[in-house]
Amino acid sequence: MILRNQREDGQERLRSIHNLIIDMDGVLYRGQERLPGARALLAYLTERDLSFILATNNSTLTPQQYVAKLAAMDIQVAEKQILTSGQASALYLAKVASPGTRVYAIGEDGLLAALEGQGFQLAERDVSYVVVGMDRQLTWEKLRIATMAIRAGATFIGTNPDTTLPTEEGLVPGNGAGLAALEAATDVSPVIIGKPQPTLLNLAMEKMGATTEGTAIVGDRLETDILGGKNAGVTAVLVLSGISNREELETSPYQPDLVFDDVGDFLLSWRDEREE
């Protein structure tokens, strides 16, 4: 266990955690590779009926697809325990736009299904909103359509700002890379729904019936997970199994409350404090 600057309140912080919001990419897995401690943590939470939500900035998959992906790694969760930035974006849009509103979406199954599930009409022309999530089939033509729509007055929404995504092969472009291209082409900055904005984490707490007190986010990225935790007012736990490393931690303006090598390391320390 590594505590930020060996903070004396580390054990007290751990004891105060009763609800978890857990990132997935770089925390539970990297690509199709399960990370150390992931299965044990989810099994511990399930066996003790502790509240948790797997909240990811990755909008590519539907909750059903995430359940299947985790099951292939021998991690069992229910659909209701998954919350993606695609779902959060569709829920946000449902609060500001009427069902049937025309939306141009760049993204994969997770985002498209979430938008259609909220009653929006996916279209390429005469749209009121452009919603952009990670798309591994991103093309110049998709960027062209989005650029023209935004320049014509459509509201520009980004599911998440992550510039990279951890995979077994290393870091690959994330949704933030596509957003940067559109921002450069339109001179318009997107409204961001996922971390570090608090929207996704607030929705996760709402799903759990939890409040900021007693809730922690466990993530691997300082500028999204940890800053998002600070913005939402919850305990921020960094694991060093994904994007951010010790060198970045030393100089980052976004400092976590607790730091661990991976979720297995976190579980050992948290379980010791809970069951002491």
Image (cartoon, rainbow, N blue to C red):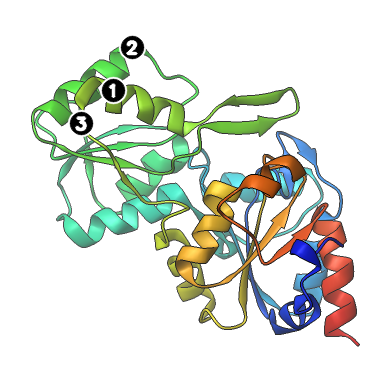
The tag on residue 123 is 3
Disc 1 is placed on an element classified as helix
Discs 2/1, front:
1
In the displayed structure image, the side of residue 47 where residue 51 appears, left or right: left
In the displayed structure image, the side of residue 94 where residue 211 appears, left or right: right
Res 229 visible: yes
Disc 3 is placed on an element classified as loop
**Depicted 153 relative to depicted 91: above or below:** above
Q: Give the labeled residue for mark 1.
A: 184
Percent position of residue 11, x then y: 80, 79
Residue located 82% across and 50% down the image = 74
Residue located 86% across and 76% down the image = 271
Res 40 visible: no
Q: Give the labeled residue for mark 2.
A: 140
Measured Cα–Cα span from mark 3 to mark 1: 23 Å
Q: Amino acid at mark 3?
A: Ala
Measured Cα–Cα span from mark 2 to mark 3: 17 Å
User: In which quarter of the view is residue 177 placed?
Assistant: top left
- Crowding near the residue tagged with mark 1, few <14, some 14–19, many ≥20 C-alpha atoms within 10 Å: few
- Crowding near the residue tagged with mark 2, few <14, some 14–19, many ≥20 C-alpha atoms within 10 Å: few
Q: Amino acid at mark 1?
A: Ala
In the displayed structure image, the side of residue 71 where residue 118 appears, left or right: left
- Crowding near the residue tagged with mark 3, few <14, some 14–19, many ≥20 C-alpha atoms within 10 Å: some
Q: Amino acid at mark 2?
A: Trp
Residue located 55% across and 72% down the image = 234
Viewport quadrant of the N terminus: bottom right
**Depicted 272 relative to depicted 177: above or below:** below
Measured Cα–Cα span from mark 2 to mark 1: 14 Å
Percent position of residue 65, x then y: 59, 44
